[in-house]
Image: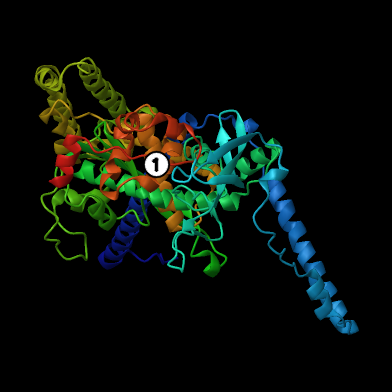
């Protein structure tokens, strides 16, 4: 039987070989894609593990102690949907039955009626202890007949509780005798007596319900201790009197805006004379729009900047946006040292160029000198060390050695500290940056280690800046500590009512923080300043700043300040102050 097998031709073998080559190329490409995908997954997995390690270090409450809300949230959503469906079914049934009579009347019944105002509250109805302040007229006392007092009440505060301050203004009957040109000039003509009441002393707020002592207590409770107004309202109710949160909010905004003149005077002095400014920022929530125009919607984000001027002043400034424009406007005209983190909003300021989209400002002047923060540099290596990366551990060891060497020089005079830094600290700094450069050329995936090395490389100049002067610090921790009251208390406040309210709060934060800096009692300081400011000349507001308050108060009449309400005599300025004002 003949063999029917067809022998393979060279053309058939070549086609088969080409097909196999194509299959091999396709498989090779798929293998490369699979390996690339696997590498991406491996990097994502490693990054997730790093984040998990960081979260484990930052979380202080065990997960078992946290309430599980997923099931409760699902049950609530299901019940809410059920109630909505039943409501729609009920409305449809009522519409089908034609039961629409009396809807307007029912709506009027359900509409809440605003309670008519009852006028100023009567503090005499409370059981508060009474402090009586009698105001007499020095020109009429002893010359005219005093016929009584005209009394009004204020709500004050002393250590230990609230007080009802009775302001008793002396009332006089003044009888004037005149000689009129008449037929008999020797006969005097008596005019009818008139009633004269002793005028009220100057006050920051005329006929206010709250005395300066109570205003100071409310402000310190919130802006130093972080107690929100609604908790103060509850506390006052337990003490036997009513002070609503709306009244406290209005006083906080008005007092903060008024005392802002003192903060502005301190800020102007800091911009002129400060050697180094340290700054940082944190975010807060602001309710949208004015109260009469407010619509339902989320709060927008504002920012509090804090600035430490040497050991002289601390002042806060509210900015609606955390941008280069806001930063350049805040530090316009300042050319000294400025210590901040390496945020991009400071780049235009340190480069001496206008922000993007803004024309050059001829009055801007030379830019400030950037001082870096070694604590921010250390933070990146700490994150890498928590993730078990050797680069992070080595970076921490080197930076901690720099801190330890500089900490030993803390008590030395600035000139001596600068010289010792050259001997002991500079070699450690040079070795650290040489190590950073050596590690930066080694290829490694993106992560916490590469981010820490990149931060150190980008901030070589600012991080070395502290070696120029013995007064400069390695870190910017002071400004972060100054922001801590805002960051801790905003969990209780939730939001500020408006941008104006936040600006007023920034002034109050400034005064309270400066009082802590100079070891003053913030409550006593605010109570005294609220009394003194109506009498004080505008050009001398700097004397009321916490830095100078101890000297200023020593020149005031102690007996006048001891009274909760009354006249305050303004002492003359010192010779040096007069010369400064003239210049």
Residue 542 or residue 501, whichever sits in front: 542
Q: At x 74% / y 67%, what residue is drawn?
A: 113
- The one nearer the camera, 483 or 249, is 249
307 to the left or right of 77: left
The residue under label 1 is: 532
In the image: residue 219, left or right of residue 372:
right
Q: Is residue 225 above or below residue 355?
A: above
Residue 426 drawn at (x, y percent): 12, 23
Of 308 and 454, nearer the camera is: 308
Residue drawn 25% across and 31% down?
A: 374
Q: Is residue 18 left or right of residue 189?
A: left
Q: Nearer the viewer, residue 97 or 210?
A: 210
How packed is label 1: few (under 14 Cα within 10 Å), some, or many (20 or more)?
A: many
The reply to whether residue 380 is visible in this rendering is no
Quarter where residue 412 is shown: top left
The image quarter in which residue 359 lies: bottom left
Q: Position of residue 8 (x, y in %)?
A: 32, 64
Say which residue appears at 54% left-offset and 48% top-offset. 494
């Amino acid at each position: 039987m003949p063999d029917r097998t067809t022998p393979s031709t060279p053309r058939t073998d070549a086609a088969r070989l080409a097909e196999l080559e194509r299959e091999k190329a396709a498989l090779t490409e798929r293998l490369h894609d699979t390996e690339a995908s696997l590498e991406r997954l491996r990097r994502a997995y490693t990054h997730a593990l790093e984040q998990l390690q960081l979260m484990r270090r930052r979380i202080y409450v065990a997960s078992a102690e946290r309430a599980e809300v997923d099931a409760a949230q699902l049950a609530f959503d299901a019940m809410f949907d059920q109630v909505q469906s039943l409501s729609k079914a009920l409305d449809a049934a009522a519409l089908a039955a034609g039961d629409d009579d009396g809807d307007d009347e029912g709506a009027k019944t359900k509409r809440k009626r605003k309670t008519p105002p009852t006028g100023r509250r009567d503090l005499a109805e409370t059981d508060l202890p009474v402090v009586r302040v009698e105001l007499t007229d020095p020109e009429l006392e002893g010359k005219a007949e005093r016929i009584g007092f005209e009394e009004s009440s204020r709500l004050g505060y002393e250590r230990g509780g609230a007080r009802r301050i009775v302001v008793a203004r002396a009332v006089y009957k003044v009888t004037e005798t005149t000689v009129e040109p008449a037929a008999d000039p020797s006969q005097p003509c008596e005019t009818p007596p008139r009633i004269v009441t002793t005028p009220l002393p100057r006050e920051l707020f005329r006929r206010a319900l709250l005395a300066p002592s109570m205003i100071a207590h409310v402000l310190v409770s919130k802006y130093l201790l972080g107690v929100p107004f609604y908790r103060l309202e509850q506390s006052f109710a337990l003490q036997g009197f009513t002070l609503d949160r709306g009244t406290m909010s209005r006083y906080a905004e008005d007092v903060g805006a008024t005392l802002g003149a003192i903060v502005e005077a301190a800020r102007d002095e800091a911009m002129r004379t400060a050697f180094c400014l340290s700054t940082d920022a944190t975010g807060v929530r602001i309710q949208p729009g004015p109260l009469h125009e407010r619509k339902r919607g989320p709060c927008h984000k504002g920012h509090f900047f804090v600035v430490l001027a040497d050991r002289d002043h601390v002042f806060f400034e509210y900015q609606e946006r955390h941008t280069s424009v806001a930063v350049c406007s805040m530090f316009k005209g300042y050319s000294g040292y400025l210590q901040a983190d390496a945020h991009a909003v400071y780049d235009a300021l340190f480069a001496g160029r206008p922000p993007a989209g803004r024309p050059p400002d001829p009055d801007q002047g030379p830019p400030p000198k950037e001082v870096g923060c070694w604590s921010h540099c250390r933070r990146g290596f700490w994150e890498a060390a928590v993730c078990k990366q050797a680069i992070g551990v080595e970076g921490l060891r080197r930076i901690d050695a720099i801190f330890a060497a500089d900490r030993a020089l803390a008590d030395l005079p600035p000139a001596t500290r600068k010289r010792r830094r050259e001997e002991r600290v500079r070699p450690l700094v040079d070795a650290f940056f040489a190590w950073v450069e050596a590690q930066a050329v080694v290829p490694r995936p993106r992560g916490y280690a590469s981010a820490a090395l990149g931060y150190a490389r980008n901030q070589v100049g600012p991080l070395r800046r502290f070696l120029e002067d013995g007064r400069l610090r390695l870190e910017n921790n002071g400004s972060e500590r100054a922001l801590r009251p805002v960051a801790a208390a905003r969990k209780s406040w939730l939001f500020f009512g408006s941008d104006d309210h936040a600006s007023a709060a920034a002034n109050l934060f400034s005064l309270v923080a400066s009082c802590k800096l100079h070891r003053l009692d913030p409550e006593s300081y605010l109570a005294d300043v609220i009394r003194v400011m109506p009498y004080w000349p505008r050009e001398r507001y700097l004397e009321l700043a916490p830095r100078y308050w101890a000297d200023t108060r020593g020149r005031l009449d102690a007996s006048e300040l001891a009274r909760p309400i009354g006249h305050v005599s303004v002492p003359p300025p010192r010779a040096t102050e007069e010369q400064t004002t003239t210049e």
